[in-house]
Each structure stands twice: as C-alpha cells, then as structure tokens.
Amino acid sequence: MYTSGVERPSSYQRRSKMKSFITNTLSDFFFEYETPRQVLVRNKRVGVVCRLIQLGVLAYIIGWVFIYEKGYQSSDTAVGSVLTKMKGVGYTNVTGEERIWDVADFVFPVQGDSSFVVMTNYIMTQGQKIDKCSEPPNSKNRCSSDADCEGRSERTGDGHMTGKCLVNTTKMCEVLAWCPVEDDGNIPEYVRSLKMMLTLYSPALLMSAENFTLFIKNTINFPAYGVTRCNLVEGIDNQYIRSCLYDPKTSPLCPIFRLGDLVQLSGFNFAAIAKVGGAIGIIIDWTCNLDHDQSDCKPIYSFHGLYGNPDETDTARASVGYNFRYAKHYMEDKQEKRTLLKVFGIRFDIIVRSVATKFDIIPTLTAIGSGVGIFGVATVVCDLILLYLLPKREFYNNMKFKVTETMEKEPLDEFKSEKEVSKE
Amino acid sequence: MYTSGVERPSSYQRRSKMKSFITNTLSDFFFEYETPRQVLVRNKRVGVVCRLIQLGVLAYIIGWVFIYEKGYQSSDTAVGSVLTKMKGVGYTNVTGEERIWDVADFVFPVQGDSSFVVMTNYIMTQGQKIDKCSEPPNSKNRCSSDADCEGRSERTGDGHMTGKCLVNTTKMCEVLAWCPVEDDGNIPEYVRSLKMMLTLYSPALLMSAENFTLFIKNTINFPAYGVTRCNLVEGIDNQYIRSCLYDPKTSPLCPIFRLGDLVQLSGFNFAAIAKVGGAIGIIIDWTCNLDHDQSDCKPIYSFHGLYGNPDETDTARASVGYNFRYAKHYMEDKQEKRTLLKVFGIRFDIIVRSVATKFDIIPTLTAIGSGVGIFGVATVVCDLILLYLLPKREFYNNMKFKVTETMEKEPLDEFKSEKEVSKE
Amino acid sequence: MYTSGVERPSSYQRRSKMKSFITNTLSDFFFEYETPRQVLVRNKRVGVVCRLIQLGVLAYIIGWVFIYEKGYQSSDTAVGSVLTKMKGVGYTNVTGEERIWDVADFVFPVQGDSSFVVMTNYIMTQGQKIDKCSEPPNSKNRCSSDADCEGRSERTGDGHMTGKCLVNTTKMCEVLAWCPVEDDGNIPEYVRSLKMMLTLYSPALLMSAENFTLFIKNTINFPAYGVTRCNLVEGIDNQYIRSCLYDPKTSPLCPIFRLGDLVQLSGFNFAAIAKVGGAIGIIIDWTCNLDHDQSDCKPIYSFHGLYGNPDETDTARASVGYNFRYAKHYMEDKQEKRTLLKVFGIRFDIIVRSVATKFDIIPTLTAIGSGVGIFGVATVVCDLILLYLLPKREFYNNMKFKVTETMEKEPLDEFKSEKEVSKE
C-alpha cells in the first residue's frame, strides 16, 4: 500500500492492478478455508464434564426435539365441514294425549348443523293469543293495588304491564302478553317448579330419546399439504354404516352414535340431563402424521359435558340446565295464535380439532441450527469451569488466549505484540 | 501407520491393536475437551464497540425475547362452545294494533347459538297466498303492453312473470307470487322507501329492544394444557348473576349485557341500527398465562360494529343494514297462507379468541440456541471492523490467522508450512 | 494469588485491592475483545468444498428462508364474520299445482348464516296428523301376523309400533305416527325410490335454482396487527355490486355468485346435485402480506364439493346426497296438522381461511441466529474432511489443535505442555 504512494501509477496500471487484486482475492477466498484453532485440553475432570454436557445436548436435540417432538416437521390445522343427521322417533303420553315426535319436531335446527339441540323435555302452552291477562300466580309478586304494578321492571317479565292489579282474581298484575302466560315458575323458584313439572312430564319424551342415533359426516382439508380426509375412512362403507354403532373400544370409527352412549361417555346421567337440559361437546380429533400413509390419519372421537352437569360445583351451577322457547304460530278463527314450547334439551357442539404434521426442511434446519447454538453454550460452560474453577486456570488461560497489548501505545504495539508472538 | 506397512502383523496382533486403538480413541475422546483458542484484542475502540454489540444482543435476548415476548413459553389456542340467552319483551303499537314480541318471536334462531339476530324492526305482509297479482307499484318498472313484461329478469323479482301487463289497474307486470306482494320498494329506491317505512314503523319495536338483555355462557378448553375455563369465573355465582349487568369499568366480568350498551360500546347509534339493522361482533378474549394461577385466566369482552354503520365510507356502505325475510305459514279455509316478515335486526356474532401460554423447554432452548447464533453474528461484525477497517488490520490478521501454504506444491508443502509455523 | 497467602493484608488494603481488582476486571472486560484464532487452510479441494457448502447455506438462508418463505415475518390468523343473502324465485308445477318458492321458503336458516341450505328438491307430505296408520308399503317389511310387528326396532322407523299387523289392507305394521306416513322408500331401496321420485318431481324446483344468486359479505380482523378487511374491497362499490356477477377470470372480486356457477366450479353437475342434494364448500382465502399496502389484501374465492358427488369412490359414497326433514305446523278443525317436507338441497359452508404476515424482529433474528448455527455445521463438515479424509490430515491436526498433556501427572504437566508450546 505504501508503495503505491511513491509514484502515481498510470490508469492502465491501476486498472490492471485492481483486476489482478480482485482475481487474487477471489481465488484466495475460494481456495482458502478457515477453521478455528483449538486447545485440546487433556484433563479428565473437565473432559468428562464437558463430554457429558455435550452428550446431553445431543440427546436432547436428537431424542427429544427430533424423535419425540418431531421437530423436523411443520404443522398445519385443517378447515372442515360437519354434517349431522339424527334418527329416531319419540313417544309421549301426557295425561292421555299420545304424541309422536320425529326428527322434524325434536331437532333444532332441522338442517343438520354441527351445533344442534335434541329436545328431551318440554312445557307446552297451547292456544296463546295476544291479550290482556294475569301473570302466572306466584307468591312473590302479589299485588294489592294498581300502584304495585307500575314500578316493576319488565326485563324478565312475561309481557307489557298494563298497570292494573287484578285484585279480585289472582292478585297478580295484568299484562298485555301472549295469553295464557306460560307458567314455568319464576327463576327464584326454578327448582321447585322444575320438580313439579318433572312429576308431570318426566316419564314422557326422554326415555325414547336415549335410543335416538346421531350420524356425523365430517370432511377436513389441510390446505398446506393438499390433503382431504373424511371421517368415513377406508373400510367404513355403506354396508358397515347400516349396522354399526359407535363404541369406544369395539367400533371407534363408526360414525353413528346412540344418544344414551354419548351422554354416558361425557359423564352425565341421562335422566338428569334430559329433564333440565345440558350441553355436550363431541370432539373429533384429527392428529395426522402425513409422513406416514394417509390412511393412518383417522379421527378419534371424545365427549365431554359442557353445561348442566348437576354434579358441578356451586360456581359453575350459576346457570342450571339448557332450555329455550319456541313457538309454532297458526291462525284460528281469523286470529293469530301460537303454541309455545319451553324446550329442554341436550345441545351438541361438534368441535373439530385437527393438526397435521409433515417433514419440512425449514423447521429441521432451524432445529439443527439452534441445536448447534446450544452446543456453543455447552462449550461456554466448560470454559467457565476451565478458566475460573480449576486450580491450573492460569495455565489454561495462557493456552487459550493470546493477548495483544495494543492500548494507546501505538509505536510500541507492533514490537510488543511481535515479542508476544515469539514468546508463545 | 507406516510401521504397519513394514511387516504384515498376525491376526491376533491386529485384533489386539484394533481393540487398544478403539479404547484409546474412546478414552481420548472422553478425557479430552476442545476449546477454541482466541486472540484477546486489547483495543479500546474495538473492545467497546464489540462489548456494546454483545450487550445489545444479550439485552435483546433476555429483555425482549424472554421477558417481554415470553419466548420461554409455548402457546395453544382453545376449542370452545358458546351458549346465549336473550331476555326481554317487546311491545309495538302499529296503527292501533298492539303486539307483544317475546324471545320466541324476536330471536333467530331460537336455540341460543353464538350467532343470532335480534329483530328490531319489520315490514309485515299478512295473508299472502300463491296467486296472480301485480308487482308493487313502482315508477321505474311501469309497463304499457304485455311485451314489456317478457324480457325482464326475475333474479331480484317477486315472482314468476306471467307475461301480462296490468294496463288497466297498476300498469305493472302481473306475477305468479305470494300475493299481495310485499312492498318494500325496489333496491334503487331503498333509501326513500326506507324513510317512508320508518315514519310508519320506527317508533315501534326498537325502543324496548334497547333494554333486552343477553346472557352469554362460554366454556373453553386448551387441549395442550388440559385446562378448561368458563366465563362464569370464580366469584360469579348465582346470586351475582341475578342482579349484575355488564359494565366495562364496574362489572367487566358480568356475563349479562344490555342490548343498548352493546350497541353503544360498539360505536353504533341504537336508533339508526335498529331501523335498518346491522351486525355487531362480541369478542371474548382469553389471553391466559398458565404459568400463573388458573383463576387469573379471565375473559375480556370487547365489541365492534361489523356492518351497517351509517358513518362508514362509501365503499363499505355498498350494502346497507341487515335484513332477511321470514315467513309464518298457516292454513285458512283449506288454503295455505303465510305472514311474511321482512326482519330488520341486529346480528350478534360471538367470536372467541383465545391463546394460552405456558413454560416449555423447547421454545426456551430454541431461543437460547438462536441467541447464541446471534452472538456469533456480533463477533463476525467486530472481526470485520478489526480486520478490514482498523489501521493495524494486517497485524490483527497475523494474530488471528495462521496460514498453511499447501497449494498444489505437494513435495514442498510440508516443508514450507513447517517453516511458516516456526516463523510464527 | 500465592503472594496473597504469604502475609495477611490489612482490611483497608484488601478493600482497596478488591476495588482496584473490580475496576481492572471491568475495564479489561470492556476494552478487550476475544476473537477466535483460525487456521487459514490453503487447500484448493477443501477450500472449494467448504466455500460451496457455506454458499449453499447462505443461499438457503437468504434465498429460501428469507425471500421465498419470508422468514422475517410473523404471522397471524383472523377472526371474522360472514353474512349471506340469497336472491331468487323458484317456480314448480307438480301435477298442475303451481307453486312459488321465495327466499323465505327455500333457504334454511332464513337469517343468512355462513352455513345454509338452498332447497332444490322435495317430497311433500301434506295434511299429516298424529294418528294410527300403516307404514308405507314396502316389500321387505311385510308382516303376516301381529307377532311380526313386535320385535322390530324403531330406530329408523316412522313412528311408535302399536304391535298390530294390518293383514287385511297393506300387510304392514300399524304405527302411531304423523299420518299419512311419508313414503320416500326405505334406505335399502333408496336408489330405486329416488329414481321414481325424480321422474315425478325432478323438472320442478331445480332448474330455476340454478339462477339464484348468493351475496356474501365477509369482514375479517387480524387482532395482532389491528387490521380489518372486508370482502367489499376498494373499488367494489354500490354501483358495481348491483350489476356484477362472480367470474373467476373477469370478476374475481364480485361478491355475488350464481348458484349454477358455484356448482360447476366445485366440480358438480347441477342436475345431479339438485336432485339428491349435496354440500359445497366456499373458501374465502385471505393471504395478506401486510408489509405491502393493505389494499393489496384481497380475498380469493374457491369452491370444492364436500359431499354428494356421484363421481366419488365407493367409500365416500357411503352416504349419498344431502337431505333433511322440515315440518310446517298448522291448525285445522281444532286439530294440529303439519306439512312435512323432505328437503333435498345444496348445503353451502363458507369457510374463511386467513393468514396475515408482517415483518417482525423476533422471527428475523431467530432465522439469522439459527442460520449462523447451520454455518457452524458447514465448518464441522469441512473439519471432518480436513482432519479425517485428507492424506495430510496429521499435519492439519497439528495446525488446528494445541494439546495440553495434563493427565494426572501434575508435576510434569506444566513442563511438558511448556515443551509442546515451544515445539510449536
């Protein structure tokens, strides 16, 4: 470099020099190769400790990250679609009136969604029309004059308060409502009224609902891998479906479920849940290792109670059971009327949980790369032992480090470090 | 190695040699330990720059990746189930006809799904039967002869064109349809017709809908951690639920919401949304750090408008409001009739967003491992400064690198590099 | 260190020493900098191999991880909401009885959910009431005496067996059911009965359903990035929506779809799917790179058949088509009656698949860090070649490693390794 300062080279010379400089640098770069110089410490204690740490890291990377957690795979969740179909006929005989309930009557909604309700009990109020009538008799909300009926909140009421108190008849406020008003007891008296109701209706619908069957069709698609699977896997054909019934042990892949089994497998008591209603989650678990054959990718069904378990703790029991109101409207004598059903039922939520894993180069190399990094940590730990804990630490320090004493003593630097080098 | 070439050893000797060789190699491997030799550069400028870079990397790894972003945790999303229940009674008085609307009338669907509609306004067309009648009078589609009624598209029409023009009466085409045809104005005149309608019906249902309440029950399950949580968390008991009302400040955990509050919190004007309909998203956010106590895992409710905000820009207003048609069928005089309702309402979509995080060894070690790698980058940056930017770069180069000159000069190689070594 | 053992220093001296020791250590630490010493191997073969491996790793990290897989970005999925609206009028003429089907009749459910059914065919059983009557005539379940009617399962039956055999009339068991019982053939004779039905009804509803249109409104929100997008993107205004129709080539962003197009794009034959029903998935794919402008974040619609494709393999055909039963109740002569519809239809599942990616410092640094680790692997590979495969491996071994022979020979150690050092 200082030679170039002596006389200014011609443009040609400079270009030629530059060219040969680049060529040399490139050939140097390509034909050279750096590898770190290392001290091979022959010390049993440090050697064993360090090798054990390194073996531990290796075992962790290969055994755990790769083999156990399958760190060489990427994963993807599926998008899917669920279709359900109930089968069964219910029969009730309430005070001599025989009734038949088929799927068009007891499933809400009718079109086979992944979340639906099977009616198992009901309070039917027939022939309601919009009129003025008394609130249902109830010891708590008695009124003695019109004044009592004015300040009352309507939020959980049955209709629009007219402000009149029916002092002569029921001693309850008059409401503009669908009359007669449904009498299911007020919420504070829910349990009592429920009991009363159950003695009337309980042996009705629920016993047959236990034998209803549910057919589930579930198709999932893993977009990242272009794989589509259906819960009617290989071997589940028309013939099999016509006769099978799901059983966790003997028929774990049959897509037809008996309601009584579902309730039992989710930890409920059928009689209890059928009376007050409840909710059950049906989980379809697709955990697929797509490095294996696709036909090994099979659904696992599991069931758990969501709401309404009477065995739950006080907190969870804040809202008991599951019910909703449903009206069938009709016209009678030119007047709109309706039949109101307070439906108690089992709500089924079909939840598809899916994860597919497949070999992918990026997580593999990321795992290896960060594994190498952890190897580096092992070396750092051993170095700490070597350089700070061993009695001969100073000796190892000298072995490992070559010191350049260049601080602010510019003219001497070169010389001194030269000396150091030769000393070594 | 060359001694073994001198005379062929016996099989016994070879085996014994091999054995001792393996033993030695193994013991060497276990009792040895390599640590890189390093140059300790005593240069204030480079030292400070390099230490600062290293401290920055350390601060990033510990402060950001570990503490702020909790890189030592794995995460999982939940599967869950939502149940809703509306309470309230609506009252309308349209031209003297008093009507009561209860949950069985104003909630669609009735069974308490996570996505549902609360009717707040309607256009009712009573007594429809299948017949031939005129399209609703409308200045734009007037016909003057049967020819005008033939080429017309039926996509957004009201019925099946008979091809006749009712020249004597309405000057509109005749259709086979549910007659009388609902008159809600054609889409191009939507705003005008809407205004007309609102002057007729607007003070009807919507004012009471503001006080309806919504109860939400949400159970979620994090399968990876086996944790199940319900939005009725610890402390939300039967007693509390009976009296509470959600308020973002004072009762953020009460699962009962007043419709008026929901609309206001999502940025809508209740009167506006009730008239033309709209959609509101109720987001239940479960962000749980399962390294803490489970009871700290509580839902946060938030609300945002999805559609129908009249304050939106032109683009978003491409489709205003939210409405659908709903029919109640009945039989009158042996003939099927229906009451058609064009329902304007608020659609609620309950969206559960969940993520649970928990300490996991794999992300921890991956973070550490890749952090060590970034440390290596810091060393590379410092090396670049040292070897290419400092004035004494050649000196440092000599310190850092030991060169072996072995290129294609095989016989000389050994000697030359030997010389080099001794030179050092 | 051994000097401190000679005489005990005073407390002041020790403190001062300690202080200066810490100061020195700190200043040493800050003004020093370690860089590994390296051997620069000038060997064409090893150099080229190693540089190629390193270039490969670099190309992988920069080209694949960063540019192709965008490893510098974090990703998030969206929460969203879908609203649908069907338009169209169907016309059927079954044995002279003209009927009009509008949206209130042919869409289930009515309120515009993301999963809904469009009725395309039906078996209507009018005037059902709860009564005792015969099962529908059927060659397989003939009875000859009351005994035949007792052991029969009711799971897939039509009603509650009374135990009587109607030997005089139909030779079928008597049931308590909604009479007359719907005759859609038993499942084993599904195909035959289906054909019979289709000859009666097929030219009915389905041809007009092909021209029905579906409007989809989809809003999504990426909570991690605070971005909200709607499928009515920039440029899709009121004007455009009123006239456009989705076409994968010419109008890929128009949110209005013709049913016939949907069916065709998903690979079905409209006539076939309309007859027996089926399910179609409409996938709205939001893959957004939020490093670009938000307005580039546009939905891509795709369609695929879920169930009911008659071209499917035997296994998938285990359950053909899609249908459900739906009842309209009415009151006639003080008696509850119903019209039962077995609805065959196309079920649409709108599936929103979303992923947004955006630059994030953590994945960037993790990728760099683990890339550096993989670089380390390259060096290890080259070292293996250098130290174990090359003919001059012993020479390189000597260059790379400095051995300390300290094993259990404590007094000699120092001396011996001193010698080794000088030998070098």
Image (spheres, coloured by chain):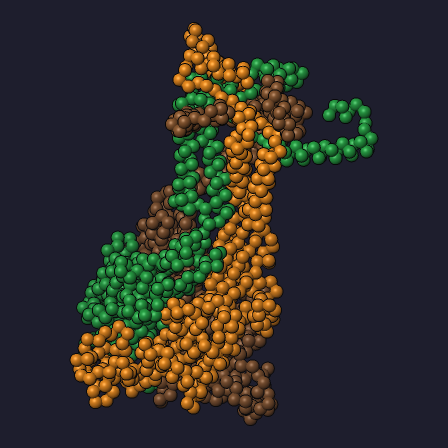
Chain colours: A brown, B orange, C green
Residue in view at x 29 percent, y 54 percent:
C316
| Depth check, front residue: A195 or C403 | C403
The answer to which quarter of the image holds residue C253 is: bottom left
Up-down: is B186 above or below C275?
Answer: below
Where is residue B40 shown, x and y percent of the image? 60, 28
Residue in view at x 46 percent, y 38 percent:
C371
The answer to which quarter of the image holds residue C251 is: bottom left
Where is residue C173 shown, x and y percent of the image? 28, 70
| Depth check, front residue: C109 or A7 | A7
Look at the image and tell me whether residue C253 can be seen.
yes
Where is residue C75 shown, x and y percent of the image? 45, 51
The answer to which quarter of the image holds residue A187 is: bottom right
Residue in view at x 60 percent, y 55 percent:
B293
B255 lies left or right of C357: right
Residue sitting farthest toward the right: C10
Up-down: is A116 above or below A254?
Answer: below
Q: Count all numbered tags in the image, as a single digit.
A: 0
B112 lies left or right of C233: right
Residue sitting farthest toward the top: B7
| Depth check, front residue: A81 or A376 | A376
Quadrant containing the N terminus of chain C in the rendered view: top right
Residue in view at x 35 percent, y 56 percent:
A219
| Depth check, front residue: B199 or C166 | B199
Look at the image and tell me whether residue B331 can be seen.
no
Where is residue B51 shown, x and y percent of the image? 60, 37
Quadrant containing the C terminus of chain C in the rendered view: top right
Up-down: is C423 above or below B271?
Answer: above
Residue sitting farthest toward the bottom: A168
